Amino acid sequence: MYASSKSHQTYTDWDDAHTDHTSTRLRPAPAGLAESEDDWRGRLHHETPGGPLLAHNTMVEAVTSGGPLHLMHTTTALDAIRASGRLYVSSGCLVAALYCAPLIPEPPGLRPHNLGSYLLETKRHTRTLVLEVTPHTRAPAKGIDYLRLGRVHLRTYQRHQGFLTEAENTRLRRTVMARIRAAAPFLDLLLANATGKRTPAVPFTDRLAATVPHFPFLGYLYFEVLSEYLMLHSTARETKRYAEAGELNNRLYKRLAHHAVEGMDQLFDLSRFHPGHDRLTKLIGAIEPALAAGAAAYTRDRLSHLFAAIALEPSQDVGAFTFQAADCERLTAFAPSLLGQAVFREMRILDRYPQLYLAFEQAKALEAWDYWNHEAIATPFNGFLPKGEIGINPAHPYATHRTWVAETCERGLLHPVEELEVTPVPRLAELHMTAMRRDGKGRAAGHVRPAVPAPGPTAHRHPKGT
């Protein structure tokens, strides 16, 4: 397996896109960073209240034990699942897995992880399945980090762009380059900050907020950095209670997202997440007042480092690279991950994306399943933070599965009531059946289409953001 040079590069790309918080392995990084991945690891693991949960939490311990795992999955398609006997997986932060949350077996019933209890409270139009997964082998603590999938996105586009019309392809390339050129002054500012040339936190945050609409990937990075800040630094009673159970507090970032963006409960689209400094301070203050003052500086430092480490190839020097005047050829060679993220997000708003979805996303799914099987991963999880987002690899050759319809008792525990004869299958669900395209009532929803930036340095014109 992975014998050819092309296959080796595929494996390397997927391995780079997985994070293991229990390991001391360091990824190759561009030169010139003021802080290394190891510096940040030490800071996050050992200098934050929630840091120990990065490596030691109930979900990761269950994944690496080799024993049976109990997971919950919410669905609006129970009748179709019964009729077909199949569970299809979906794309998203877990790439090609059945999205679930952990369950903890206790004598009275199955206790949901706090992410699961949140889903039960907010997705009342759905039914809940309990899945028992037995991997029959120990897995590493590697979790997928969707922020690092840029090279995979770019390679998939390059290999399958024949599915696009010439007009679609031309328009996609032009729009991607227009977005990068519009964002270039701020992207260069991120690189400067990553080298230690710190911008004051207030103007930095406002410029970040103003740039997100031009370059949507920054909205995802912004949100994940703030999620990390909240979940690791919170000392609230609720957070401590979850920590005692070995869990990071998911309700913190859920509140952040829903308060920051109207309609986020109907379509969770982080390209719309771009609060400016004043708004950010109010949002964090409403969640946990003690954390408001430090949010902007943390965002500046952490986001700048992550952006530089993710965007540029390890062969580059952060202090010498510039995005201004960079063409597509140069970006393909020296910043393929950033280019891939931009292409992927532009692809998702093509008029024909619902028809093209399986062509592009199933190709990534095949690679993901191959990597997970090579690494003995039966239950991939979101690894930027082990927050409880976990899935089922439907292509694992040795894992066995059992599935039940479950009911929730007055104590919030799940109880299996009907076993189903169903099997996870290695195929992505149609886009209209996935949570990415559904609102709070289960109806189909569309993606927001951000405005294409006008030519010129527009990324600093709207200082207050959302």
Image: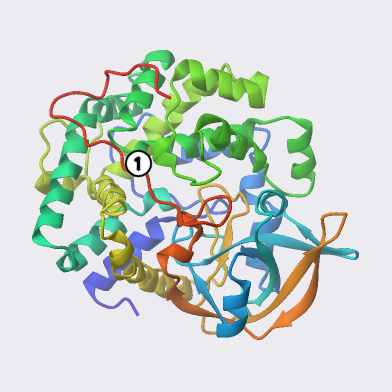
What amino acid type is highlighted by mark number 1? Phe
| Residue corresponding to mark 1 | 217
The quarter of the displayed image where residue 324 is located: top left
The quarter of the displayed image where residue 136 is located: bottom right
Q: Quadrant of the C terminus?
A: top left
Residue beneath the point at 40% across and 48% down: 147
> Total marks drawn?
1
Residue beneath the point at 29% across and 42% down: 311
* Colour pattern of the rendering: rainbow
Residue beneath the point at 56% across and 36% down: 258
The quarter of the displayed image where residue 208 is located: top left
Q: Position of residue 396 (x, y in %)?
A: 51, 79
- Badge 1: few (under 14), some or many (20 or more) residues near its Cα, within 10 Å? some
Left or right of residue 360, residue 24 in this image: right
Q: Position of residue 260 (x, y in %)?
A: 52, 30
Q: Quadrant of the N terminus?
A: bottom left
Residue beneath the point at 55% across and 59% down: 381
* Position above or below: 12 against 209: below
Left or right of residue 226, residue 369 in this image: left
Q: Position of residue 342 (x, y in %)?
A: 27, 46
Along the line of sight, the residue nearer the viewer: 442 or 356: 442
Label 1 residue SS:
helix
* Position above or below: 291 against 75: above
Along the line of sight, the residue nearer the viewer: 366 or 193: 366
Q: Is residue 290 visible?
A: yes
* Position above or below: 80 against 143: below
Along the line of sight, the residue nearer the viewer: 267 or 134: 267
Left or right of residue 207, residue 143 in this image: right
Q: Position of residue 110 (x, y in %)?
A: 80, 64
Q: Is residue 43 visible?
A: no
